[in-house]
Amino acid sequence: MKKFKHILLSLTLSVLVVSSCQNALDMAPDGKLTMDEIFADNDKTGAFLNSCYGNMPVKGTRYYFWQRGPVVWSDEAWDTDAEAESGLMSGRYYNGDASAGNHPITNISADAGNGDYWARYWNAIRNCSYFISRIDKAAVKNPADAKRWKAEAHLLRAYYYSELLKWFGPVLAIEREPYTFSDDFSTVKRGSYYEVVKFIIEDCDVALGTAELPWRITTDGEAGRVNKALAEAIKSKMILFAASPLNNGGKDIWQEAYQINKTSLANLKANGYELYNKVNVPQTYLSDVAFLGPDKNEKTALYNEYFTRSMTYSSNPVDRETIFQSRDGQGNIWDIDGIGAQDGYKTGTCPSQELVDSYETKDGQPILDLVTPYLDDQHLKPNYNKANTLFKPNDPYANRDPRFYASIYYNGSKRKALWTFAESPEAKENYPAPIGNRTRIIATYVGEPQTGIHATTRRATRTGYFERKFLHPNSGNDNAIAGANWKMFRLGEVILNFAEAAAEAGQLADAVKAVNEIRTRAGMPDLPAGLAKDELIRRVRNERRVELAMEENRYFDVRRWSAPTADLSKTDRWITGAEIIRNADGTYTYGRRLVRSTERKSYSNKFMYLPIPLAESNRLVAITGENWQNPGW
């Protein structure tokens, strides 16, 4: 870990109060200050807390070169930049070009806070710990401010620890007190996964026990500040991770995970958090040109509306589901992560056939057998659920879960927006049509010149699908509605955390009730009655896959559900797309294809966790005499 001198810190100080914590510390006119000088001043103390906020990531599309990071490194999607720019993160990751000394995820400069996690998060943890150690005696004018600031520092430290633990696993020391330059680092010890999670919960409980910390941020002036709801969300997630097979050390702690999640969920609901359950802008999302579902379904519209609108800071917000959102938006999604042909640049995220397969038909029946979804290693032979009578392989997108239509552009769907090209005769569904704002059929068959499947073209689709979940129905250069702030934590996830913990702990009725709450909001029927425990766990996991699709959860879920000695060959080795052929009579033949003929080489056991950066790992060996590095690296 990094060592910092205790006496001097070069601060870029601002005399702004902490409410402007989105802004990193500005350069002070007096250069270097002693810590005593900082904590002897109200505004400088508040400004130091800003340094604890400074490493919060934006996530979403803000990974290097405008891509979605964990979403396209899982089996949910393929990144078109993997072929167009093979030297960037996804191309290297798919090719297995990763080492402790040069890993495509960790050894890249942070873009909007995404990257260089080890150094940045430890830096933030050290600042939080130091702030906690000094705040009780700091010259803060208002005692209530001091209490709130201390609670924020505890909660931010919990957040950074949770991120390090998710990415790197149990290779972390527990830092309650800040290390000084003169400390004996040879005594530093790793905590187990469970021990670190309990420390995270301890910090969250400090925040929850602080009356001065609010449950919700209600003014724009405090945008980006943490709240008590975030503490409950972190507790919910991290105890779930600790109980999971990859991390539990062979111990059964599902009952504890169930109890913590039950309390967290109850507290969130008691303090005004609820699922987004109404279309609030019907003139947009239920219009004839939104094309949200074949039947203009209200459930489809509200789901798409939720993910394409940022949460407002209000005491009575429209969005009561979002617990914490990123400080920044997601850029021009239509240009860098939508349908690439619309503006002619790149598509970015292409949902996989595996993700599409996970959406049930509207009667609540899975498409595939959830025990053995594929009859071959490459996922080219689907094992269809024999109880499903609605699904037709030659009409695969009919009668699906409303969330499918809100999240995926598929062959035959429509989009009205500014299209910056005139149609050519080869675009049989759309020719003739000029450049302009118009409705276009999104045809994704092989050979379609604009939106068809292509193996290398950046603006094409690799899979036969385009991402829709975060894309405003009609955005474009003439309607510049950028991507919403990233919803880092939301109540829907906490409900599913609780459902999983309840199912694993044998509290089946509670698990079913929680899942059905999510399904009711989505317009899906309740789960069948009488599911056995193993059946229910599979349904809960699939519900997470659908409800949390492309929200950066799947990457971590498939790992934590695995045994410590397992690999990711069943999920991440082969990624498929639709093989769609347009017949002479205008009908289509649907099949499946590998996105590329070679496997992804990021599925072996060592890819369960990221490696500690080589230089840091070497320092830890030299200082402690122990090898802290994750297996395989």
Image (tube, helix red, strand yellow):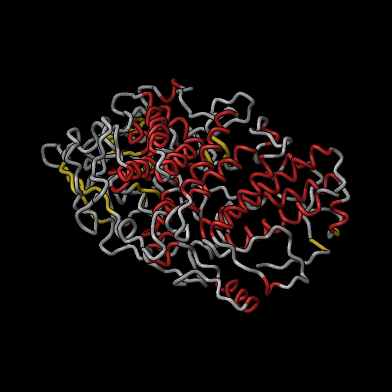
Position of 242 relative to 430 (above/below): below
Q: Residue drawn 59% across and 57% down?
A: 196
* Figure label count: 0
Instruction: Indicate the quadrant where residue 378 lies.
Output: bottom left
Q: Is residue 199 left or right of residue 143?
A: left
Q: Residue drawn 32% across and 49% down?
A: 352
**Residue nearer the viewer, 253 or 109:** 253
The answer to whether residue 228 is visible is yes
Q: Residue drawn 47% across and 61% down?
A: 249
In the rendered image, the residue lying farthest to the left is: 585
Q: Residue drawn 35% across and 27% down?
A: 523
Instruction: Indicate the quadrant where residue 608 lies.
Output: bottom left
Tell me where residue 103 appears, x and y as whole percent. 49, 67
Tell me where residue 312 appears, x and y as whole percent. 59, 30
Image quarter of the N terminus: bottom right
Tell me where residue 554 appears, x and y as whole percent. 41, 49
In the rendered image, the residue lying farthest to the top is: 283
Q: Is residue 29 left or right of residue 151?
A: right
The answer to whether residue 343 is visible is no
**Residue nearer the viewer, 254 or 528:** 254
Instruction: Indicate the quadrant where residue 35 lies.
Output: bottom right
Position of 62 relative to 530 (above/below): below
Tell me where residue 505 appears, x and y as whole percent. 43, 44
**Residue nearer the viewer, 472 or 401:** 401
Position of 232 relative to 162 (above/below): above
Q: Is residue 173 left or right of residue 444?
A: right
